[in-house]
Image: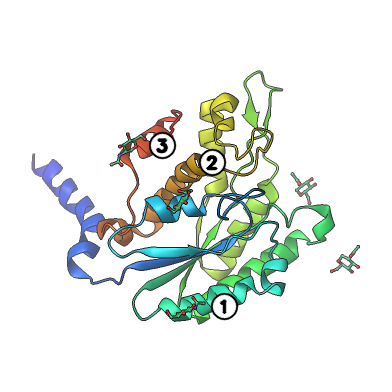
Amino acid sequence: MLGLLSLFITLLPVQALPASSQKMLPPYFVLAGDSTTATQSSNGGGWGDGFLNTTLFKGASGHNYGHNGATTVSFRAGGDWDKVLATVKNVSHEHHPFVTIQFGHNDQKAAANISLAQYTENLQRFVTETVDAGATPILVTPLSRRNYETSSGEPSIIQDLANQTAATITAAHNTGASFIDLNRASTQYLNAIGPTGAYTYNLISTDHTHLNVEGSIVFGGVVAQLIQRDFPALQAHSFVRVNETLKEDVARGIYYWP
Ligand SMILES: *[C@@H]1O[C@H](CO)[C@@H](O)[C@H](O)[C@H]1NC(C)=O
Ligand SMILES: *[C@@H]1O[C@H](CO)[C@@H](O)[C@H](O)[C@H]1NC(C)=O
Ligand SMILES: *[C@@H]1O[C@H](CO)[C@@H](O)[C@H](O)[C@H]1NC(C)=O
Ligand SMILES: *[C@@H]1O[C@H](CO)[C@@H](O)[C@H](O)[C@H]1NC(C)=O
Ligand SMILES: *[C@@H]1O[C@H](CO)[C@@H](O)[C@H](O)[C@H]1NC(C)=O
């Protein structure tokens, strides 16, 4: 009894202390990325809007700057990154700004001519400038595509973003930034539910990269859950909340439809 009680007391403060002892401004999430973050449109759609629409509460908010076709180079050259930093400055008085940074799908294409070393450096520069602007960076490994191979009998996800995932984690280690491993979490879930379920999240049936509204809600929820793990205060203050059924289904590898 005493043993159990002391275990409870030791574990409790980790989650509970921030709620009672610290004030925290509501977070504002500025999303930087490519079409796998972007708003649903005719040729793109990612997890960003599902995350912003369904997981933020109590004054928490954000803006989706995901840009179809963007690389770590074009996002800066085309002026999107300046908008991210301007938004951080704008919201800082009333919010704790976070910047999520997810690239790789287009950087990896031969036509982009961006080496893994350049990709890593570009991510690190985004992180440094985010910190300098007064925001908290969160590096995000790229959302998995929903392409399967069956060489082992069971359909399993083709891990064609492994190099970009590893490079994103390296960028986090080199800068001391937080990262969430969305590639791993999405790959695990997609392997568990298999292709039939996975394809229901396709923006159009032949597009296994972009997400429809429901897919955005599912993977937006996965992102929110990963963020809660790294920043328990956001959950303790109820700023970031994830549908319990979604949470349980993803954890058990059961197909979820919002
Ligand atoms: C987000 O909300 C907007 C406005 O209500 C809606 O048009 C859009 O379909 C929603 N998208 C997602 C992915 O939830
Ligand atoms: C900054 O805030 C002002 C006033 O609310 C708004 O008009 C402007 O569009 C905002 N700029 C950015 C980059 O969000
Ligand atoms: C690719 O990038 C390298 C180094 O940045 C450059 O030297 C080379 O000319 C580029 N190749 C093409 C085809 O643009
Ligand atoms: C990852 O990088 C290695 C070494 O640069 C390369 O041989 C391999 O083809 C790359 N994998 C993918 C999936 O691009
Ligand atoms: C969570 O998701 C399930 C399945 O879509 C839905 O039935 C339920 O109402 C949701 N719960 C909340 C609290 O939104």
- Between marks 3 and 1 in the image, the one whose residue lies nearer the viewer: 3
In the picture as drawn, the residue positioned furthest to the top comes out as 153
Q: Secondary structure at mark 2?
A: helix
Q: Which residue is mark 2?
A: 186
Residue at the image point whose x is 46% and y is 74% from the top: 135
Helix, strand or loop status at disc 3: loop
The percent coordinates of residue 100 (x first, y second) are 51, 62
Label 3, ligand 5: CB separation under 8 Å: yes
Q: Amino acid at mark 3?
A: Pro
Question: Which secondary structure, mark 1?
Answer: helix
Residue for badge 3: 258
Q: Position of residue 134 (x, y in %)?
A: 45, 79
Does 80 sit above or below residue 107?
below
Query: Badge 3, how many Cα within 10 Å: few under 14, some, many 20+?
Result: few
| Sequence-wise first label, 2 or 1 | 1
Question: What residue lies at 40% left-to-right and 57% top-to-bottom?
Answer: 230
Q: Earlier in the sequence, mark 3 or mark 2?
A: 2
Q: Quadrant of ligand 5?
A: top left
- Amino acid under disc 2: Ser
Amino acid, disc 1: Glu
Q: Residues within 10 Å of mark 2 (few under 14, many from 20)?
A: many
Find the distance from the CA under tag 2 to the CA under tag 1: 28 Å
